[in-house]
Amino acid sequence: MVTDTRDERIAKLEARLTKGFIAIGEATARHIDVTNWERAWIELLREYESLNDEIAAHHAETVQAELPAMPRAEVEAA
């Protein structure tokens, strides 16, 4: 089983969100009930947001870990 990278997952979700948004808009214009489509689209959006939150948290941890520690005297003066 091949696992997608985060970038690949984001790209796939973005493509699905875009396609779904367009389809919902077109169906709505034709007066088709899109309630279930909207629910599915919102679930995709939540997955996308969650993945982006995960990436942001990982980035913040990485940046924090890369920062040099302040000498004790500077910490107390700050």
Image: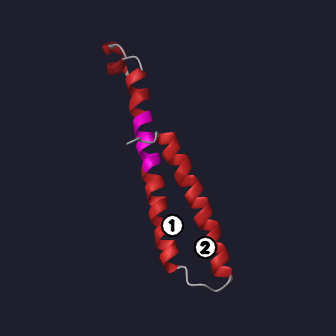
Main secondary structure along the magenta-highlighted residues: helix
Disc with the residue nearer the chain's start (2 vs 1)? 2
Residue occupying image coordinates x 44% and y 64%:
43
Q: Nearer the viewer, residue 14 or 78?
A: 14
Which label is found at residue 24?
2
The amino acid on which the numbered mark 2 sits, given as a three-letter code, is Ile
The amino acid on which the numbered mark 1 sits, given as a three-letter code, is Trp
Residue occupying image coordinates x 44% and y 27%:
63
Q: Where, by quadrant of the figure, is residue 66 drawn? A: top left
Relative placement, left or right, of 47 versus 22 is: left
Which label is found at residue 9?
none
Residue 33 image offset from top left, x and y in percent: 56, 84
Judge the density around disc 2: few (<14), some (14-19), many (≥20) Cα neighbours within 10 Å: some
**Is 32 located above or below residue 23 in the figure?**
below
Secondary structure category for the residue under label 2: helix
Judge the density around disc 1: few (<14), some (14-19), many (≥20) Cα neighbours within 10 Å: some
Q: Nearer the viewer, residue 61 or 38?
A: 38
**Is 13 located above or below residue 73 in the figure?**
below
**Is 6 located above or below residue 38 in the figure?**
above
Asked if residue 55 is among those painted magenta in the image, a careful observer would answer: yes
Relative placement, left or right, of 53 versus 20 is: left
Residue bearing the label numbered 1: 41
- Check if mark 2's residue and mark 1's residue have beta carbons within 8 Å: yes
Specify the farthest residue to the bottom.
31
**Is 53 located above or below residue 36 in the figure?**
above
Residue 22 image offset from top left, x and y in percent: 65, 67
Residue 4 image offset from top left, x and y in percent: 45, 42
Residue 59 image offset from top left, x and y in percent: 44, 34
Chain part drawn in magenta:
51-59
Q: Nearer the viewer, residue 74 or 59?
A: 59
